[in-house]
Image (cartoon, rainbow, N blue to C red):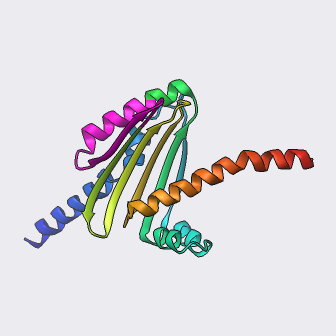
Amino acid sequence: MKRIFLLLLTLFMASSAFAGDFITRFLKECVEPERPVSNVNIGKAMLDKMAANTSDEELKATFRELKSIRIITTENRSDSRHYYDKAKEMAAAEFSDFEELASINEKGSQINILLRKSDEKMQDLILIALDNESKLTIITVSGNIDLNSISKLSDSLQEKRAEEPLLNKDNDREN
């Protein structure tokens, strides 16, 4: 009886961990060598360092509550459309335990946000986005997710991305 219980527990834990890892499955099953993507993984240790390096208390708390953030991007327009469709198909077929949180389609941008709540302290979020320039972004977030804080984090990252070209222009002028 003990062996059966341990076997079932092991199988459940393995399937739960694998089912929650959309990025790993996407990379393994959908990405083609001739259509490369960029992949960034931010683990718990880095999230803790990010928390220590920010003065914003809300962001600090958000970073501490998260387990991981994983991001896939590609800027090639035809690859982006291809992978966007593949990601949506995979989410619908293999991640049916996720609920659609939001679906946005405006001005050439398409965004799908899915959420799975394991318990009060553990959620998994999948964001699949194709922007108005046909650039693909897939983001997964795991941990204790406060959607308001995630929105603030997203706004913060977008502001930093908007500043990057300005910083590069300033550096070009100095050189």
Lateral position of residue 24 relative to residue 165, left or right: left
The residue sitting at 71% across, 49% down in the picture is 164
Mark count: 0
In percent of width and height, residue 154 lies at: 51, 54
Picture layout, residue 89 above or below residue 12: above
The image quadrant that residue 74 belongs to is: top right
Lateral position of residue 161 relative to residue 17, left or right: right
The residue sitting at 56% across, 30% down in the picture is 133
Front-most of residues 155 and 83? 155
In percent of width and height, residue 143 lies at: 38, 65
Front-most of residues 33 and 158? 158
In percent of width and height, residue 3 lies at: 13, 69
Is 29 within the magenta? no
Front-most of residues 149 and 123? 149
The residue segment tinted magenta is 83-110
In percent of width and height, residue 32 lies at: 48, 31
The residue sitting at 21% across, 58% down in the picture is 11
Q: Residue furthest top?
A: 78
The image quadrant that residue 30 belongs to is: top left
Is 106 within the magenta? yes
Lateral position of residue 37 relative to residue 171, left or right: left
Q: Residue furthest right?
A: 175
- Quadrant of image for the N terminus: bottom left
Q: Residue furthest left?
A: 1
The residue sitting at 41% across, 46% down in the picture is 127
